[in-house]
Image: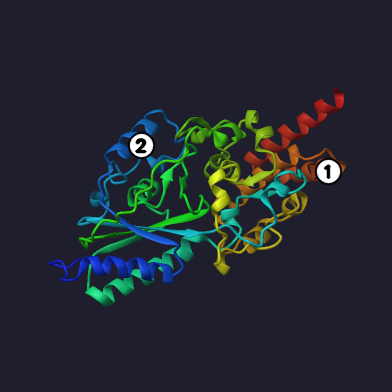
Amino acid sequence: MPQPKPSHPPTADYPQLADQIKRWARELGFQQAEICAIELGEDEIHLHNWLQQERHGEMAYMANHGTKRSRPAELVAGTLRVISLRMNYYPPNAKLAEQVLDNAELAYISRYALGRDYHKVMRKRLQKLADKIQAQVGEFGYRAFVDSAPVLEKALAQKAGLGWIGKHTNLINQKAGSWFFLGELYTDLPLPLSTVKSENHCGSCQACIDICPTQAIVAPYQLDARRCISYLTIEYKGVIAEEFHAAMGNRIYGCDDCQLCCPWNRFAVPSVEADFAARHPLDAPDLLELFSWDETEFLRRTEGSAMRRIGFEQWQRNLVIALGNAPDSDQIKQQLERALPTATPVVAEHIRMVLARQENAVRE
């Protein structure tokens, strides 16, 4: 938990402390930790424009909290610095992503969600880092974040020198690609800023723009979340427009296409964290088997996983769309027809769309 802020800043050798923080972070399993200031003027403008264009879709939380998202000291009073950290997550034991995507009878789950929920893993490590700092300097003000509050984590990571925001709007590190999570410690310690610089190296490459199944990357560095498969399968709770169904393929939770094609990921290092190892067989599961789960089975199989956040209805909805893109079979049709009478209105609407398409295909 965050500690009460002291009435006076603790006395410390801050340059030495900054070096110790980076070493402790590596010892705790982070691949890199850097320190940045809190001014995010250009990023605030970018966020404002993105919201004005309504490209955040139904993610209302992105527009909440006023300027607290882009002004750390407004979110946590007294914040002077942000310690930005990254941790590799690509599971080394997972079936190759491309092989799963190429098999329409399998379900594709974003590689970040195959292991234990990263929020829990990283939050504990950040707390341990804060405890080490406190043991060194005494009581200080801080707050830890892991994708859980109004924080511009990618902008802060870029400012700290962990990488650059690529054309797909993910952070890219020149030596490690983009398969990593980000976390932050907001602190009132006047730590020296990291001198690491990370220039943009996307160049003329636009592989991520070209490969996006739904053309969600509408221009370099501009993402329309309303078209993004990650948004549609995870954030969006309603009926997904049929225009996106075919492009979604067998992706039932998230989408990694823009990372899979990025040339910088040839330098990516698989995670060594046991918690991020793939839970078999979720790295290459059978669509029909997943659709046969009831809610109890879904909750049991996704315990401790980030996937649980979408709930059973969205899980079924996403599976129905993927089944509609699988090779036609009597078994798929029968399972969908059997599920229809007890399905929720959202799931039922998707089942009817799939069955109607199959019926039209037979007529043609």
Q: Amino acid at mark 2?
A: Leu
Q: Does 61 sit left or right of 81 as displayed?
A: right
Structural distance between the alpha carbons of marks 2 and 1: 46 Å
The residue located at (25%, 51%) in the rendering is 37
Quadrant of the rendering where the N terminus is positioned: bottom left
Q: Which residue is mark 1?
A: 334
The residue located at (58%, 52%) in the rendering is 311
Quadrant of the rendering where the C terminus is positioned: top right
Q: Which residue is mark 2?
A: 47
The foreground one among 94 and 321 is 94
The residue located at (39%, 67%) in the rendering is 25
Q: Secondary structure at mark 2?
A: helix
The residue located at (32%, 74%) in the rendering is 132
Coloration of the structure image: rainbow
Classify mark 1: residues with Cα within 10 Å, few (<14), some (14-19) or many (20+): few
> In the image, residue 353 lies at what x, y percent?
71, 32
The foreground one among 348 and 155 is 155
Residue 213 visible in the current orientation: yes
Q: Amino acid at mark 1?
A: Gln
- Kindly report which numbered mark, 2 or 1, lies closer to the viewer in this rendering: 2
